[in-house]
Amino acid sequence: MFLWGTATASYQIEGAVTAGGRGPSVWDTFAHEPGRVRDGHTGDVACDHYHRWQEDVELMDGLGVGSYRFSIAWPRIQPDGVGAPSQEGLDFYDRLVDGLCARGIVPAATLFHWDLPQALQDRGGWMARDTAARLADYAAIVAERLADRVPLWITLNEPFVHMALGHAFGAHAPGQALMLDALPVGHHQLLGHGLAAQALRAHGAERVLITNNCTPVWAASESDQDVRAAEAYDTVHNRLFNDPVLLGKYPDLSAYGVTNLDVVQDGDLSIIAQPLDGLGVNYYNPTRVAAPAGPAELPFEDVGITGHPTTSFGWPVVPDGLRELLTSLRARYGDALPPVYVTENGCSQPDDLAADGTVDDQDRITYLDGHIGAVRAAMDQGVDVRGYYVWSLLDNFEWAEGYTQRFGLVHVDFATQERTPKASYHWLRDRLAAHPEPWPAS
Ligand code: GAL
């Protein structure tokens, strides 16, 4: 059965950052540093989902989705990142999972959606190899408690974005700007993925996935330089995190002056290339790159895409990019590509609450219709797509942009926590009731 779902992440919605003995995460630290997040916003309260989860599960039930992708806050389970788990932390997810199951909604749990316990950051975070082993310990703890009811597990969310924005450019927690020296963060996350996948299976997980952020890469021109720049970007954004997992090897990084990743030890790649039950793919937009104009640290320059509508973020809306991406994954990996789950897709829009209490987000409806149509087209072209999750159920804490980018099917008034389903919520509910599988774009 095709899985329709909505997706969220712990730090973006839960709030209640000290409840139940939760320890601080790197995002708590980062958001409280002046100048890091727009308007000084933090996830301290967010959507207060920790206290309002029942209302949020009812919203999903009303929408008619068959699955919910959420992430578990590691610092709720192990406040110091190591050792015995917090029962209160486990109890929270236990209740949530029971609430989902009671409504026939399949829980899909992500282990790590960027909120590393601060205590592990203090020991080196993802620059340290040991963090991979700690992820596996944590995976074992949560699977032991929840795998009897959670069939679908995602080890990591977007290790590329976490490496690039968190460790190379410093725009996300933990705020490191290491540029190419951040590459070990990629390897240690992948090693953590492999070890966690083993731990999840050993504790009864039925299906194990990794979620990668993927983008079709367009060269700005047909010149050799621009084509090479596009290949270099494709390598670091897409191949660096898909090739080791699906093929058991790293792509050629010579465009970055890297001939040998010295953090890779014997045996690591076979751990990383665990058999998977699916590849989670998050898609937002294609990326267009050119060769850098002058001497530059990186072998590409993002030159942006024009001629398409844009979201509030300014991201180009290119539904066919999702078809292009899915079919190119199939072409690149062939039978090594497991079933694909689109684990995030969505857009930020202004989404003002009108005086009559409605939110008429027609642009989101157009966005979703186009992208679901692109999934349909990819399936018709032979890609085995098993699920589609809208980012996001609720407006939430959008990382460095704070609460200024609204991605939800449900509007959240952050002063009162009032939830208001938008027009897109009602539209999707009606479409899902009529279509068990993705439909062609209208
Ligand atoms: C993804 C991320 C989500 C969400 C989304 C929209 O990269 O996994 O947490 O923020 O982007 O920007």
Image (cartoon, rainbow, N blue to C red):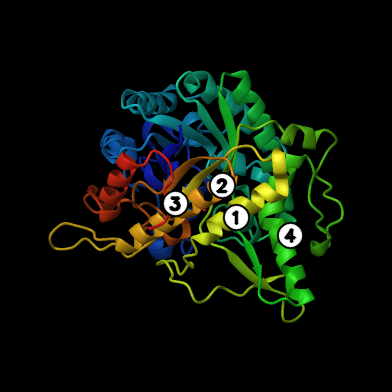
Q: Are marks 2 and 3 in contact (CB under 8 Å)?
A: no
Q: Nearer the viewer, mark 2 or mark 3?
A: 3
Residue that sits furthest to the front in the current view: 380
- Measured in 3D between alpha carbons, the distance from the residue under mark 1 to the one under mark 2, in whole angstroms, is 9 Å
Q: Could you say which is closer to the camera, residue 196 or residue 224?
A: 224
Q: Which residue is painted at 51% across and 36% down in the image?
A: 110
Residue 416 x, y percent position in the rendering = 21, 50
| Residue located 65% across and 53% down the image | 328
Report the residue marked by disc 1: 325
Residue 324: x, y in percent? 59, 57
How many residues crowd mark 3 within 10 Å: few (<14), some (14–19), many (20+)? many
Q: Considering only order in the chain, which callout, 1 or 4, is on the residue closer to the N terminus?
A: 4
Q: Which of the two residues, 30 or 316, is positioned nearer the viewer here?
A: 316
User: For numbered disc 3, what is the local secondary structure?
Assistant: helix
* Residue 398, quarter of the rendered image: bottom left
Rendered image: mark on residue 180: 4
Which residue was labeled with disc 3? 372
Percent across and percent down for residue 431 are 32, 46
Real-space Cα distance between discs 4 and 3? 36 Å
Which of the two discs, 3 and 1, labels the residue nearer the N terminus? 1
Inspect the image, locate mark 1, and give the three-letter code of the amino acid beneath it: Leu
**In this figure, which residue is indicated by the disc labeled 2?**
281
Neighbours of disc 2 within 10 Å: few (<14), some (14-19), many (20+): many
Callout in the foreground (1, 2):
1
Under mark 3, the amino acid is Ile
The quarter in which the N terminus is drawn is: top left
Give whichever of discs 2 and 4 has the lower sequence position. Answer: 4
Q: CA distance from mark 4 to mark 1?
A: 26 Å
Distance from Cα at disc 3 to Cα at disc 1: 13 Å
How far apart in space, not on screen, are marks 2 and 4 (Cα)?
Answer: 24 Å
Q: Is residue 194 left or right of residue 59?
A: right
